[in-house]
Amino acid sequence: MQNWRDNTALCIVDSLSAAGLTLEPNPAGAHVNIAYTMPGELQVPQIKIYNVLGEIVTIIPVADHTDTKTLDMTGYAAGVYLVVLEKNHRKVIAKQLIKQ
């Protein structure tokens, strides 16, 4: 059985097996680094952060195939969030993020 802290993807919806998403540190404090790899053509790529109610709390535009974005989480309540990498309005990969 895998531990939720091992940064394993919760789901990979698209067939882009080379897509990657890493969240560090996780659990996060004031900031989290979101590293991503998006293969293929970039068609409306973005990272969305959802709360446990399924509401979008943040949208981060993506301009490069590989990059790391630092998200300031000081305004976020402690809890569980879902970080989703999207391409062409379709979920590619998603990971759980814990905010302390």
Image: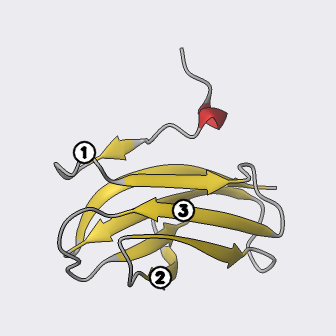
Q: Give the structural element (helix, strand or loop) at label 3.
A: strand
Q: Give the structural element (helix, strand or loop) at label 2.
A: strand
The answer to whether 43 is drawn above or below residue 5 in the figure is below
Q: Which mark is residue 35?
A: 3
Q: Confirm or deny contact between disc 3 and disc 1 (CB under 8 A).
A: no
Q: Which mark is residue 17?
A: 1
- Does label 3 or label 2 sit earlier along the sequence? 3
Which quadrant would residue 89 be assigned to in this image? bottom left
How far apart, in angstroms, are the residues tagged by discs 3 and 1?
16 Å
| Residue 53 can be seen in this image | no
Within 10 Å of the Cα at label 1, are there few (<14), some (14-19), or many (20+) other Cα atoms? few
Q: Amino acid at mark 1?
A: Ser
Within 10 Å of the Cα at label 3, are there few (<14), some (14-19), or many (20+) other Cα atoms? some
- Does label 1 or label 2 sit earlier along the sequence? 1
Q: Confirm or deny contact between disc 1 and disc 2 (CB under 8 A).
A: no
Q: Amino acid at mark 3?
A: Ala
Q: Residue at x 47, y 54 (%)?
A: 21
Q: Is residue 36 left or right of residue 31?
A: left
| Camera-nearest residue between 45 and 64 | 64
Q: Residue at x 40, y 52 (%)?
A: 20
How far apart, in angstroms, are the residues tagged by discs 3 and 2?
15 Å
Q: Give the structural element (helix, strand or loop) at label 1.
A: loop
Q: Is residue 33 left or right of residue 83?
A: right
Q: Residue 65, image x and y in percent?
A: 35, 71
**Residue position for label 2:** 59
Q: Which mark is residue 6?
A: none
Within 10 Å of the Cα at label 2, are there few (<14), some (14-19), or many (20+) other Cα atoms? few
